[in-house]
Image (cartoon, rainbow, N blue to C red):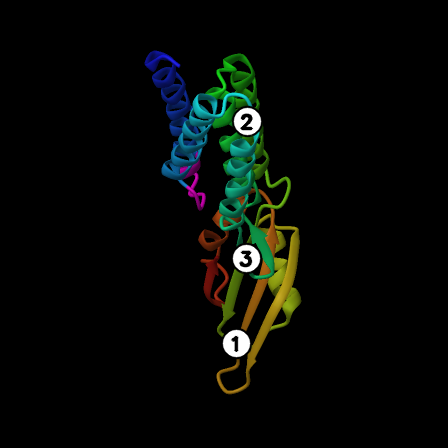
Amino acid sequence: MEIYSVVLRLGIVFLLAFAFGTQRQKSHKPVGFGTFIFVSMGACAMTLTGLKFYSENPIFILGSILTGIGFLGAGALIRDNDKIFGFTTAASLWLFSILGIIFGMGEYFLGGIVYALVWVVILSDSYLEKKGIGSYRKKLVIETISSIEEKKVRGFLKEVGIKKTNLIFLEINRETKKNVFSYFVEGSQNKIKEIPHKVSKHKWISSISLK
């Protein structure tokens, strides 16, 4: 294989992974651009090696790439408060290893189609997240200055535009007369982020936090 072809394929993979990984890093995802670059370029380099030394049957090298990336993707999953995050990131890593293989094989047209569809999915997912459609939710902790009924807290949340709430923890302190309410709240990204800024007129709330 000519050196020009090798450099071209690795260069294309590098640029595509860099652009995608940068977007994921700006979105504060658990895996940034460096990992996507290393995964895709590693897969591409292994494919090129397989084509050179095992041109008759390089399939076992390609299979080992996908198996190894599967373990890496599993490490991208994060469990927090009975919810698992990172499935999109794990699947993206797996898919970028495939992209590395595709471009390593010289299938530029197929790789371009796959890459374009990746961006369609990611941009659509970002839009739905901002609109609160899907699994976007946060853990909300509200501490009160006195003992109050839980329906008053739910009334406050409805007032600020949060209709889907799930109480997961309630702490009642008989000595201080304070309550701590922990919820999973679902809604649009903007409305959830605005909750801490809308407590000024509710004097019964001593503190509020989003996690």
Q: Could you tell me what secondary structure mostly forms the magenta stretch?
A: loop
Q: Secondary structure at mark 2?
A: helix
Picture residue at 41% right of the left edge, 18% below the top: 9
Q: Give the label on residue 146, or none.
A: 1
- Residue 190 visible somewhere in the drawing: no
Q: Nearer the viewer, residue 169 or 12?
A: 12
Picture residue at 51% right of the left edge, 43% below the top: 68
The quarter holding residue 23 reads: top left
Check disc 1 and give the amino acid type: Ser
The quarter holding residue 147 reads: bottom right
How far apart marks 3 and 2 lie (CA) works out to 25 Å
Q: Nearer the viewer, residue 81 or 152?
A: 81
Q: Give the label on residue 79, or none.
A: 3
Residue tagged by mark 2?
118
Check disc 3 and give the amino acid type: Arg
The segment highlighted magenta reads: 24-31
Q: Nearer the viewer, mark 2 or mark 1?
A: 2
Check disc 2 and give the amino acid type: Val
Q: Is tag 2's residue or tag 1's residue first in the polypeptide sequence?
A: 2
Label 1 CA crowd tier, 10 Å (few <14, some 14–19, many 20+): some
Label 3 CA crowd tier, 10 Å (few <14, some 14–19, many 20+): few
Q: Position of residue 58 (x, y in %)?
A: 53, 27
In the image, residue 60 above or below residue 168? above
Give the quadrant of the N terminus. top left
How far apart marks 2 and 1 lie (CA) works out to 50 Å
Picture residue at 47% right of the left edge, 22% below the top: 51
